[in-house]
Amino acid sequence: MKFSQRPLALAFVLFCVAASSCNKKQEVGIPVGQFASLTGGQATFGQSTDKGVQLALDEINGSGGVLGQPIRMITKDNQSKPGETSTAVRELITRDKVVALIGEVASGRSLEAAPIAQRSGIPMISPASTNEKVTETGDHIFRVCFIDPFQGTVCAKFASKLGAKKAAIITDVSKDYSLGLAKSFKQEFLKEGGVITGEQSYSGGDKDFSAQLTAIKSANPDVVFLPAYYTEAPLIIRQARQLGITVPFIGGDGWDSSELVGVGGAAVEGCYFSNHFSNQSTDPQVVAFVDAYRKKYNQDPDAMVALGYDALRLLADAMKRAGTTDPAKVNAAIAATKDFPGVTGKITLDEHRNPTKPAVMLQVKNGKFTYVETIAP
């Protein structure tokens, strides 16, 4: 009986060795973590960023990788839910042993992740979190997007350029992103000599904005600043039009989703928003990027795609300059980034780990996001 079990035992051992070899083979490469909202309320943000990251990954690994190794992306979905990001980031750092992190778009979720990355000594690059508090978390937290004080200033200056003397503001009090943009817009618009006719608020997920919009209409503003995500912005604008508010709405980069037009329809026509990128640019590098993206995904890239693309490429460049994947040395190399040729503009990180770069203003025209102008810092 004992003898007859030996072949089975030997087979089991061989199976375990083979399985172990397969696992080791699958784990080849430099582990880099990405946490993103791939499902849930802000899914288009995470999906776009991930597509940009994947395009960059194809190009980097197709050109030999980094330091002779491919990058191995490990992506986790936080489902757009509070609390899920911290769980995902801890797993990426402790279980998957990532040497760097890419994420997030939403400022609130980057603020959830940043302290964990900082304590662990793992560099984190946010593609699109614009709230200034994100990089204030510590010296391991970076971003490739401009920040809200600049974005809010751009929107206020643009409103003045449109001839607006009076502005109303509607803020999502549940979002750090919205609060930061509203603050900077108000400060700059007042500095430009404008008047704030009223400030209304709501909380993400609300559906009825009639009370806030009725108050805004009675104050008769020339423009309404709406620093919202695409999940609420088109609903608010549609209800505003139904109430007879005809003035332009201006928003930030949180509007950048096909859902804005898909839900808002004719109501959002003529509205403006600030952004990081226009796929209508004639810059040769941008044209090549847009062509590559269209070839891979059969659609045009949005700003979140471009920022995800830039984030991973900047990380790979820093690893090459560091000559190692050691997180501390990679962190120092990221901090020293100067004139990195991003598709969203040249990226030089300042002492606060924020890039100095221009913004673009886009207008919804015939259902498309049409380039209006570039505004430098």
Image: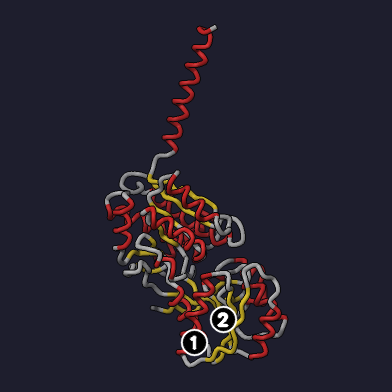
Residue 207 screen position, x and y as percent: 69, 71
Residue 270 image position (x, y, % from top left): 60, 80
Point 38% across, 64% down: residue: 342
Q: Which mark is residue 336?
A: none
Instruction: Identify the residue shown where x is 45% and y is 32%.
Output: 22
Q: Is residue 318 left or right of residue 23?
A: left
Pick whichever, 98 or 223, lies toward us: 98
127 up-or-down from 152: above or below = above
Disc 2, SS: strand
Q: How far apart, in angstroms, are the residues tagged by discs 1 and 2?
A: 11 Å
**Rendered position, 353 above or below 268:** above
Residue at point 36%, 59% (across, down): 140
Quadrant containing the N terminus in the rendered view: top right
Type of amino acid under label 2: Phe
Q: Is label 1 in contact with label 2 (beta carbons under 8 Å)? A: yes
Look at the image and tell me whether residue 54 can be seen: no
Amino acid marked by disc 1? Phe
Looking at the image, the residue that sits furthest to the right is 242
Residue 68 x/y as whole percent: 32, 44
How many residues crowd mark 1 within 10 Å: few (<14), some (14–19), many (20+)? many
Instruction: Quarter of the image for the C terminus: give it.
Output: bottom left
Q: Is residue 203 above or below residue 336?
A: below
Q: Does label 1 or label 2 sit earlier along the sequence?
A: 1
Q: Which residue is mark 1?
A: 189
Residue 127: tell me if it is visible.
yes
148 left or right of 267?
left
Q: Secondary structure at mark 1?
A: helix
- 70 versus 23 height, above or below: below
Instruction: Residue under label 2, please give it.
Output: 225
Task: Tell which of 373 and 35 is nearer to you.
Answer: 35
Position of residue 362 measured from the top left corner of the image (x, y, whole percent)? 52, 76
Residue 375 quadrant = bottom left
